[in-house]
Image (tube, helix red, strand yellow):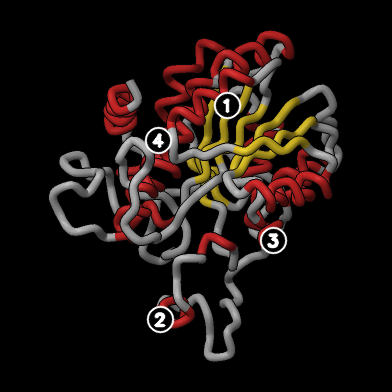
Amino acid sequence: MRVTSRFDAEATARDVVAGLDLRGRTALVTGAAGAMGQEIAAALSGAGARVVMADVEEAKLRDAAGTLAAEAVPLDLSALGAIRRFAAAWRGPLHMLVNNAGVMACPERRTAEGHELQFGVNYLGHWMLATQLAPALEQAAQESGEPARIVSVSSIAHRRSDILWEDLDYRRRPYDRWEAYGQSKTACALLAIAATERLGARGIACNALNPGGAMTGLMRHLSTEEMRANGWLDENGRPPARWRSAAQCAATATWAATAPDLLGIGGLYLEECQEAAPAHPDRPMQGVLPHARDPASAHRLWELSEAMTA
């Protein structure tokens, strides 16, 4: 049966935690200096959770954490060594890991290990973070008696590309920044399936989601002309009416991290605080394509991730 909720596209992150008591729970939010990350952190903190905010932009992160009385810890997801050090320094249980950080449509760049940057940050860095913090997630599940949760932020852009198995790092063909972004977001969706399969016996569940569109720092690599051409700005520089606020885009991730209806449930792709339906031409901004729900691809990607980070 499809998982639904009383919330919809208009709900905010604070709406979905109203009435919940998260005292005694710890959450880690990546990309927490950004608009959506701040909204997720604020909602979880407001419901009583201890929130650790992580981001590569240290000054912006400290300012954001200071307004929430949250903890700020720098984290560079483009360097596997930095992720290992971050995880090695972690102490205590972790109940909610929200993999929210992202890079979109950037010029061709590479991680410290030489991987295409969008795949490396959006997916591989988060895969490493989740696997390195699995003991803390398992500890939380054992101590609380409830499964710990990993939240993987995907995107409607998963429609732009399946996993490019033969050349995912763009070593042999011209770089396409939108295709690369789509591949990374398909990978984020597949993470939910594989992580739940691999870590479920340890009391850890993972769900992926499409947050919806909003005007955020994710657009930093796009010119005004490009955004107008994509229909993301009108002639007066205003975003389309269908787009949401950062607080609304943060709702589904916050719901995935906290909803009682999702307790112990993993491997789903969510949007608008519901389990997403299959993609359909009549709903171009909703739904999930089969390649982002393929268990065989999820299994293959997990094994490839292990090899890439060994």
The answer to whether mark 2 and mark 1 are in CB contact below 8 A is no
**In the rendered structure, which disc, 2 or 4, sits on the residue that comes first in sequence?**
4
Measured along the vertical axis of the image, is residue 238 above or below residue 305? Answer: below
Query: Looking at this view, is 43 or 224 the one in front?
Result: 224
- Could you tell me residue 32's position as x and y percent? 65, 46
Measured along the vertical axis of the image, is residue 306 above or below residue 245? Answer: above
The answer to whether mark 1 and mark 4 are in CB contact below 8 A is no
**In the rendered structure, which disc, 3 or 2, sits on the residue that comes first in sequence?**
3
SS for callout 2: helix
- In this image, 233 relative to 187: left or right? right
Q: How many marks?
A: 4
Q: Which mark is residue 229?
A: 2
Looking at the rendered structure, the kind of residue marked 3 is: Glu
Residue 301, picture quadrant: top left
Residue 89, picture quadrant: top right
- Could you tell me residue 17's position as x and y percent? 78, 41
Looking at the rendered structure, the kind of residue marked 4 is: Leu
Distance from disc 2 to disc 1, alpha carbons, whole Å, reads 40 Å
Residue density around tag 1, few if under 14, some if 14–19, many if 20 or more, within 10 Å: some
Residue wearing tag 1: 86
Residue wearing tag 4: 124
Q: Which mark is residue 10?
A: 3
For image coordinates 61% across by 43% down, the residue present is 55
Distance from disc 2 to disc 4, alpha carbons, whole Å, reads 30 Å
Residue 274 showing in the rendered view: no
